[in-house]
């Protein structure tokens, strides 16, 4: 059975992009894969976190996993910092990865911004820790949103270089799994920017904790353009939006993609349903489906967050299982490297 690994940072404001781009796919993979899903708190502290809030956010991500349908009896759910193999392997990989590779990481440049000198060293080596997360379990498949593509390429480079340097065939070359219509959900306020936990405008995203009223308000205020919705001529032969539509009508493209992902429909069908309709009509439909999909998850998350003991039990079991899987791989890695 193929082994799947993925992680979500406990940095608050879990949103529709996290759900559609990642967590929804985590759920669908668990039927025919061995799945390991991690709350990556060590990644979270690459930027400053309030310790009390971080602790709550860790439980919130675990609750979101379970509320979205990840079955803790089938899949491993655990917290990264509780399995020391991640940190240990990350150090070894820090000595395999090249500075030149890290210098090319676009997400570091975006997150560090203008004040690069003041960014943490952890933010810089962030993708090396990601490689350690995945490879500590010899995971072959990693479901993520499109923004993680470059990081996963780095994980492949690290695995390959380790294998070459030590003349072994030990670490697998991991495949990214970037699937569905919502691999890159954009902001509701600006279709050219990614929906993000850190956007200062809460109107830019649908949070997994939003009430039905908040969802409706945000969809009503979502940016659109003055034209009616596009017809099928906006799609190319591969049923993808044409470049000029993406460039000129990014909000329409984003909202249609979101609808398709929520409705589990292909984009051609969705475009044809709403072709030449007004945004006001489409927004009502989008609101209904958003509430229908997200409200049960939000309600279940609330229930789970109140049942801390249940969540902690899941995370404790997850830690044991994850530790059991990663330990022999770490041990062998240390032997290969020549540690005493
Ligand atoms: P994080 O916490 O930023 O995001 C969690 C997942 O959500 C996806 N995502 C999106 N997908 C579509 N549209 C969006 N607007 C959007 N925003 C976020 C992300 O691609 C991600 O899959 N580095 C990772 C966490 C991580 C990880 C790993 C992932 C740590 N170790 C090992 C895979 C394997 C991250 O920042 O996720």
Image (cartoon, rainbow, N blue to C red):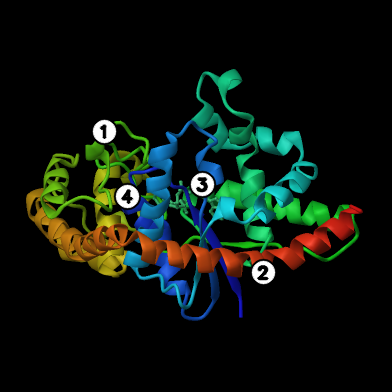
Query: Which percent across, then down, holds residue 257?
Result: 30, 56
**Residue beneath the point at 72% across and 49% down:** 88
Lower sequence index among marks 2 and 1: 1
Residue closest to the eye, 244 or 303: 303
How packed is label 3: few (under 14 Cα within 10 Å), some, or many (20 or more)?
Answer: many
**Residue beneath the point at 79% across and 45% down:** 96
**Residue contact between numbered discs 4 and 1, judged by CB atoms under 8 Å:** no
**Residue contact between numbered discs 3 and 2, judged by CB atoms under 8 Å:** no
Q: Which mark is residue 325?
A: 2
**Residue beneath the point at 25% across and 62% down:** 303
Query: Which percent across, then down, holds residue 113?
Result: 50, 24
**Residue to which mark 4 is pinned:** 15
Q: Which mark is residue 79?
A: none
Relative to residue 126, is residue 15 depicted above or below? Answer: below
Total label count?
Answer: 4
How packed is label 4: few (under 14 Cα within 10 Å), some, or many (20 or more)?
Answer: many
Lower sequence index among marks 4 and 2: 4
**Residue to which mark 3 is pinned:** 41
Looking at the image, is mark 2 or mark 1 nearer the viewer? 2
Does the beta carbon of the residue at mark 3 sit less than 8 Å from ligand 1? no
Circle 1 — which element?
loop
């Amino acid at each position: 059975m193929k082994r799947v690994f993925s992680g979500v940072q406990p940095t608050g404001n879990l949103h529709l992009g996290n759900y559609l781009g990642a967590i929804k796919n985590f759920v669908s993979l668990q039927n025919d894969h061995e799945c390991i899903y991690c709350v990556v708190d060590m990644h979270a502290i690459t930027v400053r976190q309030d310790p009390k809030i971080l602790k709550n956010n860790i439980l919130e991500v675990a609750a979101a996993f379970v509320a979205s349908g990840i079955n803790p009896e089938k899949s491993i759910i655990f917290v990264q910092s509780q399995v020391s193999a991640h940190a240990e392997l990350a150090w070894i990989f820090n000595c395999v990865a090249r500075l030149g590779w890290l210098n090319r990481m676009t997400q570091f440049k975006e997150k560090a911004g203008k004040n690069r000198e003041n960014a943490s060293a952890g933010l810089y080596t962030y993708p090396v820790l990601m490689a350690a997360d995945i490879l500590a379990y010899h995971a072959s498949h990693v479901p993520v949103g499109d923004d993680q593509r470059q990081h996963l390429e780095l994980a492949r480079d690290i695995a390959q270089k380790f294998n070459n340097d030590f003349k072994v065939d030990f670490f697998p070359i991991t495949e990214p799994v970037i699937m569905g219509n919502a691999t890159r959900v954009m902001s509701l306020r600006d279709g050219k920017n990614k929906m993000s936990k850190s956007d200062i405008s809460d109107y830019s995203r649908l949070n997994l904790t939003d009430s039905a009223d908040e969802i409706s308000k945000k969809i009503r205020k979502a940016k659109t353009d003055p034209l009616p919705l596009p017809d099928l001529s906006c799609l190319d032969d591969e049923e993808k939006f044409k470049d000029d539509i993406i460039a000129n009508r990014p909000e329409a493209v984003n909202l249609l993609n979101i609808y398709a992902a929520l409705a589990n429909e292909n984009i051609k069908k969705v475009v044809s349903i709403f072709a030449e309709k007004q945004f006001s009509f489409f927004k009502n439909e989008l609101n209904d489906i958003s509430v229908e999909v997200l409200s049960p998850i939000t309600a279940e998350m609330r229930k789970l967050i109140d049942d801390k003991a249940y969540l902690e039990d899941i995370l404790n079991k997850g830690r044991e299982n994850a530790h059991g899987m990663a330990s022999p791989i770490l041990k062998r890695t240390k032997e290969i490297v020549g540690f005493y």
